[in-house]
Amino acid sequence: MRVFLAGASGVIGSRLIPLLLIDGHTVAGLTRTEAKAAWLAELGAEPVVCDVYDTDALTDAVVRFEPGVVIHELTDLPDDPAKIAAFRERHTRIRIEGTHNLIAAARAASTPRLLAQSVAWPMPDGPGQAAVAELERSVLAYGGVVLRYGQFYGPGTFHPTTPPGKPQVHIQRAAEETAAALHEPSGILVITDDGTTRLDAAPGAAKED
C-alpha cells in the first residue's frame, strides 16, 4: 500500500516508518523542515517538505503520491513539557485546521483510508476538548479511523523513563498497533498498554474527550 504519513518526523511517525516498510508499504513522509528531509530518506521514506497550512502545496503533494491511506500523526508540541501551555493554541490549530486541510487533500486524491491521532483520556472543557471533538468528528465523517492513544512514554516522549498515569501506552507499542490498523473499518481504536479496544461510533458521536 502507498502510505502518506503526516507528522513523519515526530516521536510516533519516525517509529512507524520502519514498521510500514517491513510490511512492504511505500511511505511518503511529510515534514515542515528541509533539515528533517534527509533523515526521513535515511529511514526509507520519500520525504515531502510542506506546511500543512499551505493547502495548495499539501493537496498537490498528496494527489501526486496517490496514497491508499493517509495517516495523520501531526502535533504541534514543544520538546520541553514545561512549555506545553505556551503551545496550546498552536496544538489546537493543528487539530482543527491541520486536520481539515489533510482531509481535503485526501479527498482530492480519492484516498480511501484515513487514520488519525487522538487521545484516550477525558479532557477538560475548553478549546482543547473542542479541538479533539472536531478532529474525531471530521475523521469519522470521512469514514476514517480515530486512534485514541494513551499517554506516550518511552525514549523521545515527555515520559522517557517513568510511565505516566493511566491511560498510558509505550511509544513502540503505539506505533506497532497503528501499523496493524491500516485495514480497520471506520471507528475508534483505544490503544493503551492494557490492550487495543474497538469502539464503533457514528460521525459526531465521539464528544466525551
Image (cartoon, rainbow, N blue to C red):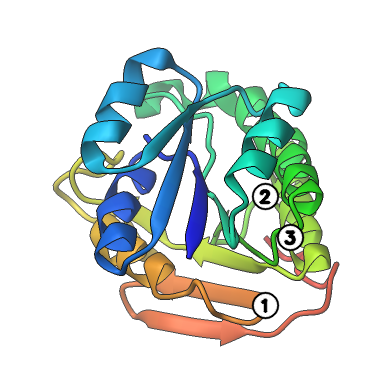
Find residue 33 and report its horizontal and vertical position in percent.
44, 17
Nearer to us in this view, 162 or 79: 79
Disc 2 packing (10 Å; few <14; some 14–19; many ≥20)? few
**Sequence order check, earlier mark of 1 and 3:** 3
Would you say 121 lies left or right of 126 here? left
As helix, strand or loop, the secondary structure at mark 3 comes to helix
Q: Earlier in the sequence, mark 3 or mark 2?
A: 2
Residue 169 shows in the view: no
For the C terminus, the image quarter is: bottom right
Residue in view at x 35 percent, y 42 percent: 45
- Identity, as a three-letter code, of the amino acid under mark 2: Pro
Tell me the element at label 2.
Answer: loop
Compared with 174, 130 (above or below) is above
Q: Nearer the viewer, residue 55 or 88?
A: 55
Of discs 3 and 2, which sits in the foreground? 3
Residue 184 is situated, as x and y percent measured from the top left of the image, at 56, 80
Q: Is residue 22 left or right of residue 200?
A: left
Q: Which residue is mark 2?
A: 124
User: How far apart are the alpha carbons under marks 1 and 2?
Assistant: 23 Å
Query: Image quarter for residue 105?
Result: top right
Tag of residue 114: none
**Marks 1 and 2, the one that precedes in the sequence:** 2
Judge the density around disc 3: few (<14), some (14-19), many (≥20) Cα neighbours within 10 Å. Answer: many
Residue 7 on image: x %, y % = 48, 39
State the residue position of label 1.
187
Taking the view exactly as shown, the residue that stands out farthest to the left is 161
Residue 139 image label? 3
Given the image, on which type of amino acid does mark 1 rest? Answer: Gly
Left/right placement of residue 202 relative to residue 12 reads right
